[in-house]
Amino acid sequence: MSMVPSDDIILEGIGLKKHFGGGGLLSSPTVVRAVDGVSLGIRRGETFSVVGESGCGKSTLGRLLLRLIEATEGDVRYEGRSIVKLGKGELRGLRRELQIIFQDPFASLNPRMNVGDIIAEPIWLHNLAKGREKRERVADLMRTVGLLPTHADRYPHEFSGGQRQRIGIARALAGDPKLIVGDEPVSALDVSIQAQIINLLEDLKDRFGLTLVIVAHDLAVIRHMSDRVAVMYLGEIVELSDTDSLFDNPLHPYTQALLAAIPIPSPTNRQPKALLQGDVPSPAAPPSGCRFHTRCPHARAVCKEQHPALETATDGRQVACHFWREIQGAGAGSISAPPSPALARRLALYRTWRERQDKPVATSA
Amino acid sequence: MGHEAARHSTAQVHASGNAARAAEPPLLAVQGLSVRFDGAPRGVNVVDDVSFSVSKGKTLCIVGESGCGKSVTSLALMGLLPTPPARIVAGSARFDGRDLLTLTERERADLRGDRMAMIFQEPMTSLNPAFTIGDQIAEGIARHRKVSKAEAMERALDMLKKVRIPAPEKRLRAYPHEMSGGMRQRVMIAMALANDPQLLIADEPTTALDVTIQAQILTLIRRLQEETGTAMILITHDLGVVAEVADEVAVMYAGRVVESGPVDAIFEDPQHPYTIGLMGSVPSLGRRQGRLATIRGTVPPAELMPKGCRFTPRCPFSDSHCANDPPPLAEIKPGHQARCWYAPLELHRGAA
């Protein structure tokens, strides 16, 4: 992956908190701390991933960073400028540069608009082009994401899931964005379609110099796509690290447990696993001290009382655990299995023939 | 139709494969199962000439993507397919000496939930929100056993303990919405296993769950299977899950089994281009190995389904032979079969 200067921050979240409920007369009295004190900086041109299980606040964080929802506390800075106080007009201009792709391509497209209009809407909204020029731009975008421009007058229901995700991507690209947040962009798709979309996102990132923020739960997808990863648990970042170090030597016990839980696609390497017990506690009543202590195999008395700060470990990695020095290495090990010689050989053959298959029609699938 | 050839070769393989592995006949042997939906174009069955078998205590994984017919196959076996529109047009499914497909509806209902049981993907939609967990487990026990309400409840409690639900006495009186997704799936498993079935069909049992919960459920299923000797058909799209739990694997594409064999053979020596493409599509957990291999396009709709191999339009190796003549499910090694004219690929397609 490309080298990224470490100090060129494009988007920054500072002490972000988002609490749901507990406010007015009619709202629920319990406060759900979906995001609870998250600070992070996203570097220009990188692919940054946020990973965690359902309810950890990763999607809420993604929306906070784009100000699609208002933060309870904290600040978001885009290109060094705070965006939480911006008025409607200024915010609209910003929307052009900060875009999002949603998980469910079925729900995120208006069924009553044809695809051409869906993709043209941001162009029209931001006054980027009119008439023939606009139509050409739409056709261009459709080609870019691997759709046929002749399908511009069709409606979303006429497309398959993968094609609908391409439409969502084309719409996100329409305003020439600088940064795109992908909220589980491939998890609703079949494996073979998922690979097409992952490759497409990577191509587009290179071609348009985009910064990508991927919110996802699939660790294999994240390892494949990202430069850096933040692991979230119950509204907090517990570990933030560059991807290879995180997967080679996870520091936080939760990261270690997540990696250990992934099924490995190699039947010869089956081994009993140290499993995490129990469920994620409710974010409405997070445990005291370290929020992971109720499920942590390494927990001690102090973990129940003191909340560990996100501290800087080696190589600029960050981890929030009292005992990371002692337990590091506990989760390391061969979580991946290299493909068998026969598979590697046939996969190489497959790739060769696959490229030949693509030559006659130039699509980026 | 070319089916004669296919049936011939699979029959041979089953005979030799079973002789090598076990003397007793498999618990379930499906032969040439074909299911058709009313209104589909002529000759395009949603499940076409599918054969496999499962032995006692073993796990067969059926792998494939949406629309490959894996769920229709399992519903057909359970007798849960609505007719119309679905019709079983060919095949047999011998379960413990009887052909499931010739039984009356009453006989099927007696088997269902007793000798064979099923777990679905989404536990919330499979549980009744208006009844307690205990009631719902006890209902299935009372349907098949001559027991009192109290005895059925007692058994339900045992089952909750068996699936390792914390505070089972309390959970017995809980409603489905009071439980997490992982706990609900444990309840579904408790329900399915309450009458000690010989065969358990699990349709994507962990797809809706988080990865740490998925690992818990898979471990639980495996442990229960060791304790009870239940045979299992696990339907999934996740190759990682397959590698962890399967003894035998059947890879399905567009209604047909394109490759089947022991799990080691499928992962160590995959033959069918679809299997290979699928494996190349999954990102590895190791260091990045460049771009992902992809499979072009999508599954064609029924009216555009090719006459021959159904993978033809997406296959990098295909030619007109593939488009016109359906390849048989031919044996590669004992017990390992692939439905491809050009397997092994390096032999027939090596000169790149």
Image: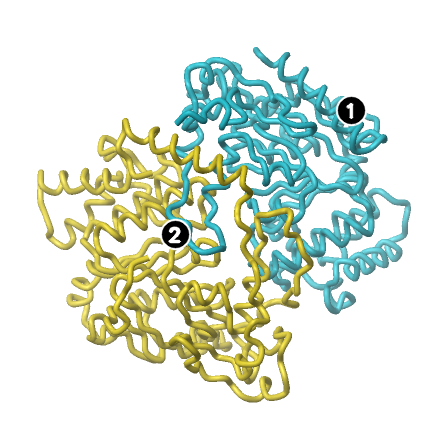
Chain colours: A yellow, B cyan
**Residue A156: % across, % down:** 33, 39
Front residue of A132/B22: it is B22
Label ID, residue B282 = none
Q: Which residue is mark 2?
A: A185
Q: Residue B309 at what x, y percent from top left?
A: 50, 21
The N terminus of chain B appears in which quarter of the rendering? top right
| Mark 2, secondary structure of its residue | loop
Q: Quadrant of the C terminus of chain B?
A: top left
* Residue B130 can be seen in this image: no
Give the residue drawn at x 66%, y 59%: B216
Q: Nearer the viewer, residue A206 or A192?
A: A206
Question: Which three-letter amino acid code belongs to the residue tagged 2?
Answer: Pro
Drawn side of residue A145 relative to residue B310, left or right: left
Q: In the rendered view, would you say A328 is above or below B143? A: below
Return the x and y of residue A60 as percentages of the image width and height.
Answer: 40, 66
**Looking at numbered disc 1 in the image, what kind of residue is underneath it?**
Asp
- Identify the image quadrant of residue A223: bottom left
Above or below, A354 relative to A182? above
Residue furthest out toward the front: B351
What separation in Å lies between label 1 and label 2 (alpha carbons)?
A: 45 Å
Q: Is residue A192 left or right of residue B252?
A: left
Q: Chain of mark 2?
A: A
Q: Nearer the viewer, mark 1 or mark 2?
A: 2
Near mark 1 (Cα within 10 A), the count class, few <14, some 14-19 or many ≥20, is some
Neighbours of disc 2 within 10 Å: few (<14), some (14-19), many (20+): many
Instruction: Find numbered disc 1 in the image and state the secondary structure of the residue it sits on.
Output: strand
Q: Picture coordinates of residue A231 (x, y %)?
A: 46, 68
Q: Which residue is mark 1?
A: B99
